[in-house]
Amino acid sequence: MNDPVDVLIIGAGASGAAVAWSLAETKMHILCLEQGGWMNPATYPSTGRDWEARAFGDFSPSPNIRARPEDYPINDDNSPIKVVNFNAVGGGTVMYTAHFPRLHPSDFRVRSLDGVAEDWPVDYDTLAPFFEENDRMMGVSGLAGDPGVPPRSPPMPPLPLGRSGTMLAKAMNRLGWHWWPSDTTVATVDYEGRARCINLGHCTPACAQGAKASTDITYWPVARRVGVELRTHCRVREITTNEHGMAAGVVYYDADGIEQFQAAEVVVLACNGVGTPRLLLNSASGRFPSGLANSSGLVGRNLMFHPYAQVYGYVDEATDSNRAPPTCLWSKEFYETDPSRGFVRGYTFQFGRGVGPVAEAAASEAKGLLPWGAGHHAAFRRLNGHRLGLSAICEDLPEEHNRVTLDPVLKDSNGIPAPRIDYRIGQNTARMMEHGIARAKEILAAANATDICVNSPILYGGWHLLGTARMGTDPARSVVNEWGRSHDVKNLFIVDGSLFVTSGGVNPTSTIQALALYIADQMKERLTNLFD
Amino acid sequence: MTTDTPLTPAQRDNLRTVAGMIIPASVEFDVPGADDPAIQADMLATLGRDAGLVREALDQLARLAGAPLADLDPARREAVATELRAKGGAAVAALTRVVLQCYYRDDRVVRSLGLEPRPPYPKGYVLEDGDWSLLDPVRARPPMWRRA
């Protein structure tokens, strides 16, 4: 029998770690259950000669391909974008590209400004101090003064432009379009015990140097030092409730597969936009027949991904290729709404530096650029190390038919029903992607790139899992209130990307963590009447 | 079938032959083909989770060829390889990727590309800082983000 805890956090990724750290100062007994384990950087792909091959195997971004014991399967057959994630202490921050933009102020007011979707119940200014706090904790590199975003002060200098960034910057200047060095959580100087980046170039599938911020090396060491308990290889099956309709605790399987019960006064969900609705739906009971916290019927609905329209080409000069962090610049030229474009809302351009030889060979062979036979070598030498590319990260608007449900057949290794994804790209987003592709081709033309290739959407591009338990003031139109507490279950909180009312057009981790810190702060302020 | 020998002798023969057709040796670039014994040994040793799909692709290849691929005359062999590539699918994609990923990590091949045959860590690479004056016209722009 496990001793009851004050706060039980489910998930040790981006948001769970931030909440754990923030709540630790209350001296409450805080426990986090994580289905994955601690990662060992000595085994990360960039330490071996098979560093590229492992992206197709045990370091694939897709849990269905990766299929580690810590992963759960996802039926995403009915989606043109496949879910990618990582299950470990650090969660998705172990396997992300460390691009760290924030949502814009306008993203919180989409109904008021653009007449679509709904406004958020919080605004940018409310989150601003939490963005700053999170930038400090994660360690953000960037350059102040960007006219494309509200003022901010990254604690470390930006990544170098490099050859690729320079070529892209010149192209953008020729077109007169905005660009700026990206905010990133790759440390450019030694920072809080983390060594600076040495350009391993393989940031996404985990950083062996420890220069990339993942919460296993940022928030968690601090949170554990001040008393937060983290229990790994524990997979939660369901949240149970008591006779008052309050969360009583969770049933989980421990590292040995033994069923356990953990009682808690407060339960905090930090399982991402797929894992959280899955768990709520798996927690259906007689009192909550359609799933826990689901009186609105919105649990699992309004799934947003950010469809990526990727465009790349080849230049005569050598690029940075794989020998640098993969992202370098962003552009906000097409971020804010301009009705003349034929769609509302907008997108960020995220510029890349290139890829390694195996990735180049595999992609170019599939695109028909790389022949079999005698012409192979000459063609490969023209392509390899010469790729220049960018992606439009397009805002996905919430649509209720895009959703996470429970698969009637598929189960994980503990026999827990797996999530099923039903998703299609909306018309507004599709028009936005076409616009992004056309502009990207202009940029690549300005960089004198040829052999232009398009991946739209990026198939394994479902990095951003948003909107499936959104926040709001109306219990009929949202799952949690404006500070993350379930409308239905007064001691149940959600802090991950499920909360997003709309997606914006940026990588969401910064905003997810700022929201988590904000909710933790609200909980601390209301400790005496948290359940009123 | 054991994990040490995930392919039958006939499948290994066809893998070697088709790999050499995908990437033949080149005197001009001073590189071996993907049918080189060391590269073949790497493929067989590291097939791992790709073994099933690669076997499937090699079975497709065997059906198309109707005989060991190496025994066909060059024109027929070329036609079989072209048909296999045109059919595509997950199995053929996996077979092709296995050939490419083992070929492009071979020391001789990596050196021929002007790269160092080593993992990225711990040495890393040097990244040019670039010309930050390129930002001057962007710095001069007024704020673009909407106040809400």
Image (cartoon, rainbow, N blue to C red):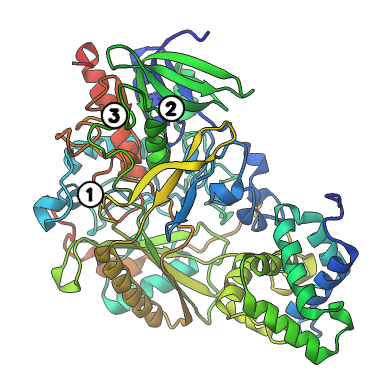
Contact between marks 1 and 3 (CB within 8 A): the answer is no
Q: Which chain contains the residue that carries disc 2?
A: A
Image location (x, y in percent) of residue A123: 17, 41
Image location (x, y in percent) of residue A314: 51, 78
Q: Is residue B137 above or below residue B86?
A: above
Q: Is residue A124 left or right of residue A158?
A: left
Residue shown at the point (30%, 11%) measured from the top left:
A243
Which quarter of the picture shows residue A521? top left
Image location (x, y in percent) of residue A163: 49, 69
Which quarter of the picture shows residue A522? top left
User: Which residue is disc 3 drawn over?
Assistant: A293
| Alpha carbon distance from label 1 to label 3 | 37 Å
Q: Amino acid at mark 2?
A: Ile
Q: Which mark is residue A199?
A: none
Q: Disc 2 vs disc 1: which is toward the camera?
A: 2
Does the image show residue B30? no
Q: Is residue A162 above or below residue A299?
A: below
